[in-house]
């Protein structure tokens, strides 16, 4: 499974194209956060790990569902926990 618009729409159970631009913006934000937190580009993964994909889908869903600004820090912590096993830290 890949992190693409079709996967995100299936995850969110969206069957129309009315919000595709909005979804792609949220996907870009989730991808930017993931790459910054992981310390590497998603393209560097030969196969996207399940927990990383889950984090991307969760982050995109939270942004989509929290358009009124109620995105909560504890939600972001859950996303970070999904990414931790693949995080690269420079020392």
Image (spheres, rainbow, N blue to C red):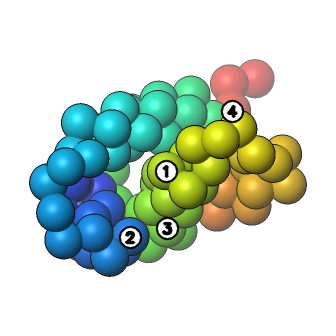
- Decide which of tag 2 and tag 1 comes sooner along the chain: 2
Q: Nearer the viewer, residue 57 or 62?
A: 62
Identify the residue under disc 1.
64
Dot 4 or dot 1: first in sequence order is 1
Residue assigned mark 4: 89
Dot placed on the residue nearer the N-terminal end, 3 or 4: 3
- State left or right for residue 37 relative to residue 16: right
Image spot of residue 51 (x, y percent): 52, 68
Mark drawn on residue 19: none
Kindly state the secondary structure of the residue where label 4 is placed.
Answer: loop
Residue beneath label 3, please? 54
**Residue 12 image label:** 2
Work out whether 55 lies above or below 12. Answer: above
Q: CA distance from mark 2 to mark 1?
A: 9 Å
Between the residue at mark 1 and the residue at mark 3, the CA separation in whole angstroms equals 15 Å
Would you identify the image quadrant in which residue 22 lies? Answer: top left
Front residue (pair 66, 54): 66
* Residue drawn 56% across the image and 56% down it: 65
């Amino acid at each position: 499974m890949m992190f693409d618009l079709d996967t995100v729409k299936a995850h969110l159970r969206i069957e129309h194209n009315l919000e595709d631009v909005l979804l792609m913006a949220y996907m870009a934000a989730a991808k930017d956060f993931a790459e910054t937190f992981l310390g590497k580009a998603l393209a560097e993964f030969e196969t996207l790990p399940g927990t990383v994909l889950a984090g991307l889908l969760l982050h995109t869903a939270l942004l989509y569902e929290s358009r009124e600004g109620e995105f909560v820090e504890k939600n972001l912590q859950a996303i970070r926990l999904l990414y931790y096993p693949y995080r690269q830290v420079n020392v």
